[in-house]
């Protein structure tokens, strides 16, 4: 058994070291680490991180705390990916 797939997925984290200078505090750096770990987990599960975050950030306020495990990327993919919530914000694209 090897962890090559994990090492490849986490390679983006060391590449952002200069960005960590702008976290302003240890708490900010910790929050960034959590977010990056969550995004890597999404990729490993085959979940689009943008779709996941848009859905979960809308769903979390009404979701029962006892069922928070359902909002992890693996279980979210099984339960909510087909009927995910979408943002009402339009992404502007330049049309040239």
Image (cartoon, helix red, strand yellow):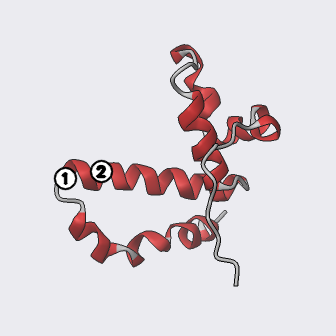
Say whether residue 57 is left or right of residue 70: left
The N terminus, quarter of image: bottom right
Marks 2 and 1 close (CB-CB < 8 Å)? yes
User: Which element type, helix, strand or loop, lies under badge 1?
Assistant: helix
User: Which element type, helix, strand or loop, lies under badge 2?
Assistant: helix
Q: Where in the figure is residue 57, as x and y percent of width and height?
A: 53, 37
> Which residue is depicted at the point 48% across and 54% down?
37
Q: Which residue is mark 2?
A: 30
Q: Which residue is mark 1?
A: 26
Distance CA(mark 2)–CA(mark 1):
6 Å
Q: Nearer the viewer, residue 88 or 38?
A: 88
Q: Is residue 90 above or below residue 19?
A: above
Q: Where in the figure is residue 82, as x and y percent of width and height?
A: 82, 39
Q: Is residue 58 above or below residue 48?
A: above
Instruction: Name the residue at the left extreme.
Output: 25
Say whether residue 86 is left or right of residue 64: right
The C terminus, quarter of image: bottom right
Question: Residue 60's image quarter?
Answer: top right
> Which residue is depicted at the point 70% across and 78% down?
95
Instruction: Name the residue at the right extreme.
Output: 82
> Which residue is depicted at the point 73% across and 56% down?
46
Question: Residue 73's image quarter?
Answer: top right
Q: Where in the figure is residue 67, as x and y percent of width and height?
A: 60, 19
Q: Which mark is residue 92?
A: none
> How many C-alpha atoms fall within 10 Å of the one at disc 2: few (<14), some, or many (≥20)?
few
Instruction: Name the residue at the bottom extreme.
Output: 96
Q: Is residue 72 above or below residue 64?
A: below
Q: Where in the figure is residue 72, as x and y percent of width and height?
A: 60, 37
> How many C-alpha atoms fall within 10 Å of the one at disc 1: few (<14), some, or many (≥20)?
few
> Which residue is depicted at the point 54% across and 70% down?
7
């Amino acid at each position: 058994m090897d962890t090559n797939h994990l090492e490849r997925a986490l390679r983006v984290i060391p590449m952002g070291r200069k960005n960590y200078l702008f976290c302003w505090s240890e708490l900010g750096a910790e929050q960034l680490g959590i977010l990056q770990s969550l995004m890597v987990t999404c990729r490993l599960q085959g979940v689009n991180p943008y779709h996941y975050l848009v859905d979960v950030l809308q769903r979390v306020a009404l979701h029962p705390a006892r069922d928070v495990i359902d909002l992890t990327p693996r279980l979210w993919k099984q339960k909510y990916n087909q009927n995910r919530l979408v943002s009402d914000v339009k992404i502007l694209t330049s049309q040239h």
